Image (cartoon, coloured by chain):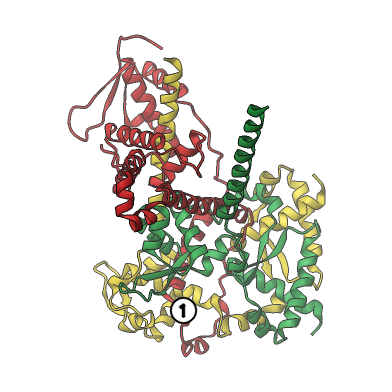
Chain colours: A red, B yellow, C green
Amino acid sequence: MEYSVKIDRFEGPLDLLLHLIQKNDLDIYDIPVAEITDQYLSYIHTMQVLQLDIASEYLVMAATLVEMKSRMLLPVHEDELDDQDWLIEEDEEDPREALMHRLLEYRRFKEAAEGLKVREQERSEQYSKPVTNLEPYIEEETNKNESINASLYDMLDAFQKMLQRKVKSDPAITTVPREEISIEDRMGEIMDTLSTNGGKQSFNKMFVRSDRSFAVVTFLAILELMKGNVIQCEQSFNFEDIIIYKTGGESL
Amino acid sequence: MSDTHHQAVIEGLLFVSGDEGLDEKQIRDVLDIDIEEVRRHIDVLRQRFESEERGLQIVDWAGHYQLTTKPEHAEYFKRLVESPQSTTLSQAALETLAIIAYKQPIARVDVEDLRGVKSERPIRTLQAKGLIQEVGRSEGTGRAILYGTTSGFLDQFGLRSLDELPPLPDTEVDSSIENEVDLFFSQFEKVEQEHESTE
Amino acid sequence: MSDTHHQAVIEGLLFVSGDEGLDEKQIRDVLDIDIEEVRRHIDVLRQRFESEERGLQIVDWAGHYQLTTKPEHAEYFKRLVESPQSTTLSQAALETLAIIAYKQPIARVDVEDLRGVKSERPIRTLQAKGLIQEVGRSEGTGRAILYGTTSGFLDQFGLRSLDELPPLPDTEVDSSIENEVDLFFSQFEKVEQEHESTE
C-alpha cells in the first residue's frame, strides 16, 4: 500500500522554512541563505528517498532558494554596475527581503490560527443543547404562505447541526478515556496470544478492539515482531486472512 | 464538593441532555455521589425551579429526569415558531430539505431515519412551498413515495443545476483519515526514536 | 406583565432555542416589548445565572443569545456527552480560516499566496463545515470568488462579532523595533570595541 503523505506535517514550504529557522535558532531578519538552502534541500532529498509525494510548491521554493544563494555568491562587477545603473538600483535590495516578508506574514497567520484553536477549545468547554422540537406548536395554515428566508449555507448549516446532534445523542456515557498502550506492551500481548493458541493466530483476530490507536499500535507491533524474526506471516491467497506464526527464532 | 456546586452541575447536566433527559444513575456516576444524595439535590433544584421567576421545570418519570419549559408559557413558544424570523421552524424544514436535496430520490422513512424524528410535517411544508415534489415510487413492498427537489428549489437557492450544490460535509471522514495518518506517523516516529536511542 | 414573568419566559425561550440561540428581535417580537427592555431583562438574567448555585450562563455569540453550561463545570459534561466542537479542524484548515477571517473578502489565490501552498481542499472543507462562504466576486479580470466567514464561524469560536477577533499578531511592527534595537546594539558594540582598541 502506498501512502501519499504531505511532507511530514508541514503546511507548505513556508512552514518548513520557519521550522528550519526555528530549529536552528536562525535570525529570520538575517537569514543565512546558504545554510538554510542546504538544509531545505537535504530535507527535500530525504523525502525523495522515502518516496513521499512532494508538492510542487516545495520544489518551486527549492529553486528560489538556490537562485538566491547563487545570486548572493556572485560578485558584482563594477562595469556592469555602470551599464545597468537603473536595473541594479532596483535590484540592490537584499534578495532575502521578499522571502523574509513572506515568512513573517505567514507566521502572523500561523499564530492567528493557533489563537483560533485556543478559542475553539475554550468554546468547546461550554455545552449547549439542540433546539427543542417545536413542531407540535406549529399550526398548519400559518406556515404555508411563509416564504423560506434561507440561503444554501443555512441549509448546509442545518444539516451539519443534525450530524452533530446525532453524534451527541448516540452515546450516553460511552466516552472512555483513551488508554495508551505502548507498542512494546502490545508486542508482549501478541506473543502471549500466540502461545496460548498453539503458536499461531489469525491476523484479523489480533485486532480485538476497534479503536484506531489500538489498531495502529497492533499493526506496528506486528511489524516490529516480524522485523525481529520472532513471528512470521503467511497468506495463502489474495484477500485471504493472514496467519501469524511464532517462529523458533530469538525471543524477546 | 459543596451541595451548591453539585446542584449547579446537575442543572447543567439536565440542560445538556436536552429532550432525552438523564436517569439517577447517570447523575450519580458523573458526580460520584450516591443515589440518595442525587435525589436530595434534585428536590432542592425542583423547589428552586418552582419560583415564578424561573422558566424551566424538572419533570421525571421513574427516576428519569428532564428539564422542560413550563406549560403556562406555551403561548410564547407558539409565537416563537410563528414569528417570521423564526429559525426554529426552518431548522426542521432546512434539515429535511438538505437531506432530500442531497439524497434524492428518497422516501420519507429514510429522511426520518437520518433526522431521528418524524418528518411528515416538514415534508408537507416543503411540498406546499413548492421546494420538493414526488418523483416516483420505491421498488420495495410499500412502494413508498420518493421525494426530490423542484426547479423552484434551484431558483430559491440560486443554483443552475443540482450539480452546483456545494459538497456535502463529508469532512468527518476526511479528518479521521488524516488523523489516522498522523497517528500512524507519530507512533512510527516514536518507534524510530526508540530505535535510534538504542543504537 | 411583570418583569419577573418576562424574565422567566426569556429563560424558557433560550432553553428551547438551544444551540441556535435567539436574537434580540425575536425575543422582542415574542414578548411584545422593546429592545431596551429585552436587554435589561437579559442583564438581570445574566446576573442571576452568575450565582454559583446555577449551572448555566447566557452567552452572546454571533449576535445570538444562548444558554450554555459554565466552563468551570466542563469536566463533568465531558464524561457525559461529546463536545459540540468535536469536529476539530486540521492545521491546514485552521490556517486558511485564519487568513480568511482576517483578510475577508479574499480570493483563493491570495490565500494560497500567503500560505505558499494550494488551498483548494481546506477551502472546500471550511465551506462544507459552514465556516466560510462566497461573499462576492473580485473586480479583476478573472472575477475570482471572494470568501468571507459565516455566522457559523462566530458561533464555533464563541465570538459576538468579527470585531471580537483578537488583533492579528503584528510581527512586522515587532520586528522593526527588534531590528532597531539589534542595530543599535551592534553599532554600540562596534563603537565600544573601537574604543577599547584605541585605549
B160 lies left or right of A25: left
Q: Position of residue C57 (x, y in %)?
A: 71, 62
Q: Position of residue A161 (x, y in %)?
A: 49, 64
Between B90 and B120, the residue placed more toward the observer is B90
Q: Position of residue A148 (x, y in %)?
A: 46, 83
Q: Is residue B9 above or below residue A76?
A: below
| Number of residues whose C-alpha sits closer than 10 Å to that of mark 1, classed few (under 14), some (14–19) or many (20 or more) | few
B19 lies left or right of C48: left
Query: Quadrant of the rendered structure where residue A135 is?
Result: bottom right
Q: Position of residue A220 (x, y in %)?
A: 38, 28
C136 lies left or right of C65: left
C144 lies left or right of A26: left
Q: Which chain hosts label 1?
A: A
Between A129 and A66, the residue placed more toward the observer is A66
Between A87 and C102, the residue placed more toward the observer is A87
Residue C7 appearing in the image: no
Residue of label 1: A150
Q: Quadrant of the N terminus of chain A?
A: top left
Tell me the kind of residue under disc 1: Ala
Residue in the image at 35% along x and 74% along y = C140
Query: Quadrant of the rendered structure where residue B32 is?
Result: top right
**Farthest residue toward the left?**
A237
Q: Is residue A71 above or below residue B106?
A: above
Residue in the image at 66% along x and 33% along y = C192
Q: Quadrant of the C terminus of chain A?
A: top left
Between A175 and B137, the residue placed more toward the observer is A175
Residue in the image at 40% along x and 62% along y = C110
Dot 1 lies on which element?
loop
Q: Is residue B183 above or below residue B56?
A: above
